[in-house]
Structure formats: structure tokens, C-alpha cells
Amino acid sequence: MSLKCGIVGLPNVGKSTLFNCVSSGKAQSANFPFCTIEPNLGSTNVPDKRLDTLSEICKPQRTIPATVDIVDIAGLVKGASRGEGLGNQFLANIRECDAILHVLRCFDDGNVVHVDGSVDPVRDKEVVDAELQIKDLETVEARLAKAEKAGKAGDKEAKKLSDLLTRYRDALVQGKSCRSVQTVNEEEERMAHDLFLLTNKPVLYVCNVDDASASSGNRYVDAVREAVKDENAEILVIAARTEAEIAEIEEYEDRQMFLEEMGLEESGVVRLIQAAYKLLGLRTFFTAGADECRAWTIRIGDKAPKAAGVIHSDFEKGFIRAEVIKYEDFVHYKSEPAVRAAGKMGVEGKEYVVQDGDIMHFLFNV
């Protein structure tokens, strides 16, 4: 599945350091603005303890986790919507992403320069928001003029689009992002998606803190929380420099000891990858057996034939039914035959909406 999260923010806030921690790709990381010019794309495994448990039970020949794509995008500066810095390229790269990981600098360090000369994550957020909003306003006004003209000529679809665009324009003029506008039905959701507006993409604010603030945050994080309290967005606190050190530790036990010393239960990178997966509206189903235990990625709301098609297009075309085991039942009974004998295996048809954690076997005929 080709959905991807873009890491964005001002220059020198820790985007590339974070990207290197979470991704198989390796971005250049240095102490000067615009260190990243071309976007870096990497794919990373999604940590899932359920897959580990299934592998312990089935002892398969191979175990394959789900993956998520992460893009490290060049830093934005004020005036990007007018082409300042790498603005036009930056905005185009965001448009190609499905969700945004907005990194905010929430630490003091005189050795790391800030493009605006001081640390203020709320100001930094507003700079990025404003540039994206300006670009969206240009897009909305251009589309609105065409939709209004078509609507007056009797095009009912254009009239509905015009109503939605008007609400977007009003929000943007007030300095609000498009994601603050609620769609009223599935038709509006489809129209909103097709507009590809920058500020309508789901966002996670990643507060990059110093080592001492990794477990509890700091005053900068508190300020960000206050600034985004009315947005439909989450905040994740992470110490990118510390995560870079953790990423260099090869032994699992040594990593856990390091985390304990930091007062953390798990790596911030693990939480970030899982948050990115969720932000993209993705969920996981499993196939489990002696040959392979594998996590497969689908969108929330996908039905059984669509899930079958993720494995192979023929499975979707010739879908007959799906045999479904709930994860908890498989863990309890330890095998598919035992689950079947206990009457805990479900048989589902084409309208079944796949649930996160389902273990599935598809029957098909082509």
C-alpha cells in the first residue's frame, strides 16, 4: 500500500535525525539550514507485539511485519508559498504525502542554530501553518470560481462542491486549517479528498526535546499542547538525539536497559512509527501458519474481498468467503484446528468489515 507520511518543519528542528532513526533510508543530518534538499523516502517496519506472539506460537519459517513509508522533506521557511527558500518544491512534496508528521523544536542548544534565532515551537508551527494555508487559499479560490460558475448553470455536483469550498475559504481567511472544517457526509468526504488540500491532511505534532525532557516533556511542549488543543491532532514527545543513540545499540537487552535509565518503557521511535500508521488510517490483519506469519496492511473500513486483494489480486476477483479467527482466540487455543474445534472460527462474506488483529484465511475461485 503506497500511503506515506511526510516529516515536515522548519530547518534544523531534527527532521532528518528523526528520519534516520525510523527509516531504512538515511538522510543527511547537519547543523545548517536546507541540509535536506531532495526528499528522502524510506520504508520501516511497524512494531507489533501481536505478530511476535503469533510467531512464538506458530514457529514459522519466516515472519514478515507490516511497513509504513516515511518521507523526509526539505525545511520550510517563511515565504515558502511565494517560492522563498525551497518553498515550491517543499509544498509539492507535502501534497504527495497522505499525512504529516510536523516536527517542532522544543529544546535549547546554543550549538544548534535556529533559522529564526530563538526557540519558539508555537511560532514555528504558525509559520508552517500560515504558508500551507496561503497555498490552500489560492487553490480553494481558483476551484471555487469554477464551481460557482458551473453551479449557477445547473450543475448540482458543482453546487455541492461550491458549498464545501466556501466553508474552506472562510476557515482559511480566519487563519484556520482546512482540517478544522467538518464534512457532513460521505460525498463531501470524497470531494474533500479529491481536492488534495495541504492543511486537510491529518497531522501529528512531534515535539523534539532534550534528553532530560524525554519522559515528561517541558515548558515548550506545554505551550504546543495549549496551541493545538482545539485541533483534531495528537502530540508525541520524543528526543531525536537520544533515539539516534538507541538506534546504534544492537542488542535488545542493552536497548531496554538504556530506555529504563531514561525512564521510558519503549523507544520513542516505536511510538512514532505506530502513530504514523494510525495517522494514515491503517489497520492490520494477519495470516499465520508454519510457513509464514505475516502482518498485512489495509485501510480502516476495508471489507474482506479488499483485504484478500492485498495478498493477491486473484483472491479479490474470485473471493468466496473468509475464515476469521480473533487474535485473542488464537492466542488462547494456540492453533487453527483447536480454534475450529472450539467453534471460535467465523465464516464471513463479502460485506464483512475486517477488524484490526483478525487472523484470516481466504477461499477463492478464479
Image: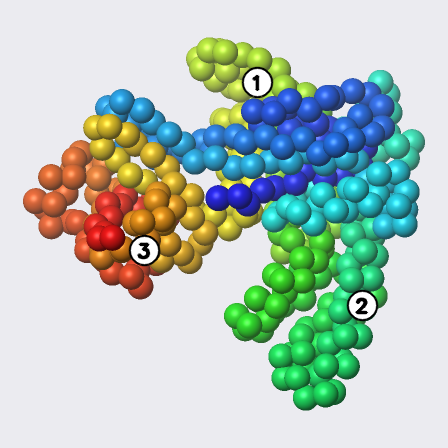
Instruction: Say left or right for 168 vs 51.
Output: right
Marks 1/2: CA distance?
46 Å
Amino acid type at circle 2 is Ala
Q: Which residue in the protein does label 2 denote? A: 142
Up-down: is 113 above or below 138? above
Mark 3 residue crowding within 10 angstroms, few (<14) / some (14–19) / many (20+) = some
Instruction: Say left or right for 294 vs 279.
Output: left
Amino acid type at circle 1 is Ala
Residue 16 appears in the rendering: yes
The answer to which of 175 and 187 lies nearer the viewer is 187
In what element is the residue under mark 2? helix
Up-down: is 137 above or below 68? below
The x and y percentages for residue 3 are: 55, 45
Residue at x 59%, y 71% (from the top left corner): 188
Q: Disc 2 vs disc 3: Cβ atoms closer than 8 Å?
A: no
Q: Which mark is residue 317?
A: 3
Mark 1 residue crowding within 10 angstroms, few (<14) / some (14–19) / many (20+) = some
Q: Nearer the viewer, mark 2 or mark 3?
A: 3
